[in-house]
């Protein structure tokens, strides 16, 4: 039906939790208030007859999750992430996420910035089941690169372009600084993968030379100070570029967070910080087990309990803005078993792990139900701030009249032990195997359509819309 009413729900925004009904028409939230069903029944009985009523008594109603860091179909040269834009977005939908902003892979050497934009439309259009946008990616800075960026912003609504400080296509400080100055001038955000490439390269080489090849050497080759040095450097460079809009992706360590705190204390404006579900809930002891360790090879690596705790605090006190996933699954046993490429040499393992399906439920359970965060803090970091950081607000990330009717219903009374049997995407393992999740996702709606009910995906291939994004709040 074109009109739906969600009644008696406990609605959570990034600021408050309140009881109310939500009237949805043509995919948009029309009204929120008390007793909307009664009012409609009295004022327009015919319309009421044609309205689908969804009873949300005893449930929390949250805006649909927004995961601004995924890597569907990521091609890393010797392997490709196993969730394409269909499987990966089905998994996202079943986990209460209704929009993603996906990070593009690098293209061929010296390719234009347009190359990957076109490639990603081929990969996603007609497949994605939830709304999706792309972050562009810099892999060099040629004379024409910045004008290509300007064109892509205007034509495609891609208003963020990532820079890596490690890997083959990293940018050095000179080029990064140039990009930051252009970003400031043009109102674009630069998400940055912060690790010190020289140190990582050196440590990986020395581990291999001494025959240290198991997964447990992966975290040792990428210590927390590598992240902290790069985070500090980026924030200083951004300040020198006139408080350029930068966004630290997947912050994983207490040491990195200290750099963020310093910049916030010095009132630096225009930067955002993201952490990911895995850095809040998992630790590096997984690497002691060769199998579990292989599954958890990702960059940056999992850290210590103290890092985890610092990150929860950072979310609660507003130092960290968003929680994403860096969803990038490879098979462990199934298909080409790409993770096994690292079985005898951790440097050969494709980096990344699944997480897009788990994020909202893990944050509801480990954040809200366990008392680490309030429900508005969960909504702020998983829905509202991601939308604000990446130019999707106020269409996405909140439940207010005029916003898209993207939402998720949580039943706090139900618990479930998450296992690989629950996976809806293509991956054959979950890093959250055996985790008890409090709160059950009963229903997910995208633009007024119920796309998940009782864990069953009801949406359609290709129903996701491409998101042309606007200006980030980081750009003033
Ligand atoms: O390990 C990760 N994060 N894999 C995805 C690619 C990247 O580094 O972001
Ligand atoms: Zn990533």
Image (tube, rainbow, N blue to C red):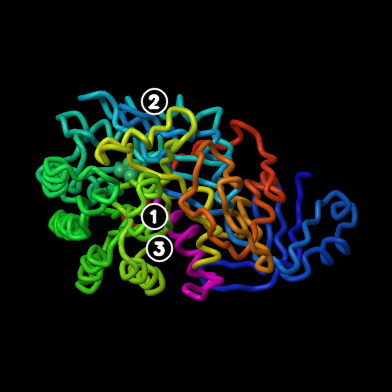
Local crowd at mark 2 within 10 Å, few (<14), some, or many (≥20)?
A: few
Whether residue 332 is visible: yes
**Element under disc 2:** helix
- Res 175 seen here: no
The quarter of the image holding the N terminus is: top right
Number of other residues with Cα within 10 Å of mark 1, as a class: few under 14, some 14 to 19, many 20 or more: many
> Magenta part mainly helix, strand or loop?
helix
> Could you tell me if the residues under marks 1 and 2 are in contact, i.e. CB atoms within 8 Å?
no
The relative height of residue 459 versus residue 259 in the rendered view (above or below) is: above
Residue 425 spot, x, y in % from top left: 55, 39
| Left or right: 309 in relation to 92 | left
Residue 254 occupies quadrant: bottom left
Mark 2 vs ligand 1: CB below 8 Å:
no
Which residue does the image show at 46% across and 51% down from the upper left?
431
**Residue of label 2:** 118
Nearer to me, 261 or 71: 71
> Element under label 3?
helix
Check disc 1 and report the residue beneath it: 389
What residue would you read off at disc 3? Answer: 280
Q: In this view, does 351 lie above or below 231?
A: above
The residue stretch that appears in magenta? 367-390
Q: In this view, does 85 lie above or below 110?
A: below
Image: 294 above or below 56: above
Q: For this rendering, which residue is in front, 22 or 73?
A: 73
- Cα separation, mark 1 vs mark 2, equals 24 Å
- Distance in Å between CA atoms under marks 1 and 3: 21 Å
Give me the residue at 29% from left, 55% from top: 248
Which comes sooner in the sequence, label 2 or label 3? 2
Q: Which of 184 and 207 is in front in this view?
A: 207
Q: Tag 1, which secondary structure?
A: helix
Q: Does the magenta stretch include residue 186?
A: no
């Amino acid at each position: 039906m074109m009109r739906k009413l969600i009644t008696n729900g406990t609605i959570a925004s990034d600021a408050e939790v309140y009881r109310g009904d939500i009237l949805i028409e043509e995919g948009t939230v029309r009204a929120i208030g008390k007793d909307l069903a009664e009012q409609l029944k009295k004022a327009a009985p015919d319309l009421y007859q044609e309205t689908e009523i969804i009873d949300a008594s005893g449930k929390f109603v949250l805006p649909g999750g927004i995961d601004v860091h995924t890597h569907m179909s990521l091609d890393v040269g010797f392997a490709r992430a196993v969730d394409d834009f269909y499987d990966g977005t089905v998994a996202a939908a079943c986990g209460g996420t209704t929009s993603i902003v996906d990070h593009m892979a690098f293209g061929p050497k010296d390719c234009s910035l347009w190359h990957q934009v076109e490639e990603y439309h081929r990969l996603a259009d007609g497949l994605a089941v939830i709304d999706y946008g792309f972050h562009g990616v810099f892999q060099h800075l040629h004379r024409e690169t910045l004008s290509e960026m300007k064109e892509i912003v205007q034509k495609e609504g891609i208003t963020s372009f990532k820079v890596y400080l490690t890997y083959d296509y990293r940018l050095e400080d000179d080029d990064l600084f140039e990009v930051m100055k252009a970003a400031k001038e043009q109102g674009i955000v630069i998400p940055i993968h912060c690790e010190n490439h020289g140190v990582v390269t050196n440590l990986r080489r020395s581990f291999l030379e001494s025959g240290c090849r198991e997964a447990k050497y992966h975290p040792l080759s990428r210590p927390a100070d590598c992240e902290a040095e790069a985070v500090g450097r980026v924030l200083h460079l951004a300040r020198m570029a006139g408080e350029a809009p930068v966004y630290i992706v997947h912050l994983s360590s207490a040491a990195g967070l200290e750099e963020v705190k310093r910049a916030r204390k010095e009132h630096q404006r225009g930067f955002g910080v993201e952490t990911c579900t895995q850095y809040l809930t998992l630790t590096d002891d997984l690497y002691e087990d060769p199998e579990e360790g292989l599954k958890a090879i990702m960059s940056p690596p999992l850290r210590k309990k103290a890092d985890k705790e610092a990150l929860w605090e950072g979310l609660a006190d507003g130092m960290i803005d968003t929680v994403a996933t860096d969803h990038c699954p490879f098979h462990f046993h199934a298909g080409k078993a790409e993770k096994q490429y690292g079985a005898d040499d951790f440097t050969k393992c494709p980096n990344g792990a699944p997480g897009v399906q788990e994020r909202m439920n893990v944050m509801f359970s480990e954040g809200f139900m366990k008392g680490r965060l309030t429900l508005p803090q969960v909504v702020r970091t998983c829905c509202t701030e991601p939308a604000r950081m990446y130019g999707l607000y106020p269409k996405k990330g909140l439940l207010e009249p005029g916003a898209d009717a993207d939402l998720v219903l949580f039943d706090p009374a139900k618990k479930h032990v998450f296992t690989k049997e629950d996976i809806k995407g293509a991956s054959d393992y979950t890093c959250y195997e055996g985790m008890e999740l409090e709160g059950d996702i009963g229903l997910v709606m995208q633009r007024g359509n119920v796309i998940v009910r009782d864990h069953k995906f009801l949406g359609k291939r290709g129903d996701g819309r491409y998101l042309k994004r606007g200006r980030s709040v980081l750009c003033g």
